[in-house]
Image (cartoon, helix red, strand yellow):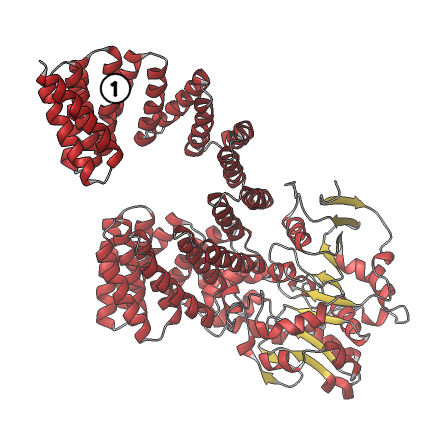
Amino acid sequence: MDNEIIFEEYEEDLEPLFPPKSSYTFLVGPGISIYPPTNMPSVMVIVKSLLELCAPVEEVGNLLSLEKLNYELVVEKIQNEIDENLRFLDYLDEISEPNLIHFFLANAIIYGNYVITTNFDYMIEHALMQCLDKKWHKDIIPVITKEDFIFYQDPKNLINSGRYPIYKIHGSKRNIITKRDTKDSLITTISALEKERNEGKTFAIEPYKKQTVYNLMNKRTLVVIGYSGSDDFNMGPTLRELPFLGKIIWIEHIQENQTKIIHFKGEENIKKENNSHLEQLLKEISINGDFEIILIKTNTKNLIHLNLWRIFFPDSSIEEFIPIESKQKIQRFSEWIKPLYQDTSQIDKYKLATQLYFFLKEINATMRCSEIGLKKAMEVNDLSSKSYFLNFLGLINQVKGKYNTALKDYEESLKIDKLLGNLQRKTTVLNNIGSIYLTKGEYELALDKYQEALTLSEKIGDLSRTVVTLINIGRIYEIRNELDAALEIYKQALKITGEIGNLNRKALLLDNIGMIHSTKRENELALQHYEEALKITDQLGDLYGKLIIQNNIGRLFDESHNFKEAFERYNQTVQIAELLGYPSKKAGCINNIGSLYLAEGKQELALDKFKEALDIERKLGDPLMIITYLNNIGIIHNNRAEYNLALNVYREALKIATKIKDLSKKALFLTKIASIDMIQGNNSLAIEEYEQVILIFEELGEFSNKAASFSNLGKIYENFGNYNEAVNAYAEAFNIDDKIGDLFGKANDLYNLGRLFEIRTEFRRALLNFKESGKIFGQLGQEQYVNVINQKINDLNWKISNQ
């Protein structure tokens, strides 16, 4: 297949992969600095050392065992709770000896190639200073700050003018060439990367760097070194949005002394295989990029020593750049940072652990640390910390569904915040209280809390909290079907989001606005907002978000009967779910395609898709999803009058619903089974089934459904010719509909009673029921029913007059 991605793995000569006339840009990450004599601590060493000093000793092992714990998250939370200035990064000043890879990159710059690094260290600068005569050191240009990126946008011009630029895409604490303090440039979290974006600007790095990155990579071969792909620190989203590249060569370090080369070809029809995270990333990049992608798995240091140096610098000896032994005499990182963090309080340590666990959705661990932290705060009468941990306990109890307990935690936290005058936390807690009321369906109380939070956030100028609160208010308006009000609120939030540059939230708001327009049947506006949200998810590399939005677009086309376009969108969601390795999502997406075929009347194709979704879900074992797909299969069999097949499917679904004690689903399938039994003349079975259904709806408090079940029961008794029981059943239905105020149900019940009284020749009782039924249908504007009933009344008047 021409458009299928193919993996070719084989041994080959490396030299043809790096033709001398090509233009090269090197993108380098933290892996390049761990080799001697630099001996920079690895990311995991940094994380472990920080946690050992900044987290409770009994939690360090638990935290390190978490698969999703990463450097960026730890640094972000330490900056929030322990060290705003990230003093541990000053350790980089202690290390000044470059290794062979740094010298290779320095020479690459000298020879006219471009180098971009996400590292905070200064090793490439040190290597350049050693390679160049001291008089040329002033021409080394570390591009770090916003001003640097704007002023030095053209690397070609810099090099042609005898300069040696190195682009530090994530900033650095200082410029060691000019001795300038540049700590404001540091970017250590994706959220920080999303500042300074303008509306409509959706590139995955700051807009002011966009032109520079384009100039650095346009029609060039990008060589990536020092990244595993699992900690690509926002470079994955960036690389997905570089269609102007010439080629990507990704060098993945492995310990073995062998080289494996994988070529990625094609664009679509991605199939899930047992690939590494990096291979999956390169697959994603290959979807959008019309360029060659090559993965080289090798020992990076050996590759440079034995191959790349000779290829790139054939006239330069490598020997002078191979250090014999390190002259650096510095402490290990774990020892060096001890004076910085050894006095961290136990309360702050528990705050850090609580934050990390909560972010990683470790609910029980979050509660454990919050409870211990609360106890320690109370021991020393630290009211601020007491409020902090109470708020987290409220969050956990809310997640667990213990809403009254959560409300008590929040209210106690709010009381402290009011006493201390902590307006920011007061805003947060008010939003949390509002979310409890929202969950409980007490919308006015929720709205009151959100409005109070909004007033506070606007007062203190906290734009981020203002956006969060506006989104919460918008949700309430949506729930109450006040769509125009919700739309205005979301647009207000979107405008502010554009100012603060939170792209994830911007995509969410665009999606919300799209859904409102879709509900209002304003399809063009809905599609416009969905597509803008989709663009953002692409540029952020948010495949899950892309799946959700593509599904919404598919539904929009589906409801507009544009089945061809809907099919295309739904098919893309299947591919994304496959790429993500989410089989349950894949099953749901396949089910959507089945529903599309069903809407087109292609029942056989729909049945195939529903069965495919069911087969996937059976392996996963989610009973609710299995029930959903069984129901869809049963609908098709029922539509095709394949009643025995439908019964088998519905009975299996009923068995599962009974096992998991889902009364609502149990009632649904009992009703479906009873309907088929009625059709097949199994009236006794149908009566038993409806009697069970009635008891379930009574237990659930679903009185409207209970009334409908009595009405169905009445029809079965009619089929039997047991008119007395039928009258009793219809009368029960009427009593319920009357009690709950269901006028249409009442009119229908009276009509059924009138028919039965007419059958039993009780013409005057029949007449009274028909007249009352007709009166209600008239009030409801149901003229078609009124006309039928009037004819019945005329017939009855004639019968009465002739008795």
Residue under pointer 1: 715
Front residue of 683 and 786 = 786
Mark 1: amino acid: Lys
Q: Which residue is drawn at 47% across and 66% down?
A: 502
- Residue 345 occupies quadrant: bottom left
Q: Say whether residue 622 is left or right of residue 177.
A: left
Answer few, some or many: residues within 10 Å of disc 1's Cα (few below 14, many 20 plus, some between 14 and 19): many
> Vertical placement of 402 versus 735: above or below?
below
Give the x, y percent position of residue 721: 22, 11
The N terminus, quarter of image: top right
Q: Say whether residue 781 is left or right of residue 373.
A: left
Q: Is residue 315 visible?
A: yes
- Residue 378 occupies quadrant: bottom left
Front residue of 128 and 442 = 442
Give the x, y percent position of residue 668: 33, 28
Q: Say whether residue 462 is left or right of residue 590.
A: left
> Vertical placement of 425 versus 461: above or below?
above
Front residue of 662 and 781 = 781
Secondary structure, mark 1, is helix
Q: Residue at x 60, y 67 (%)?
A: 332
Q: Residue at x 53, y 34 (%)?
A: 597
Give the x, y percent position of residue 423: 29, 71
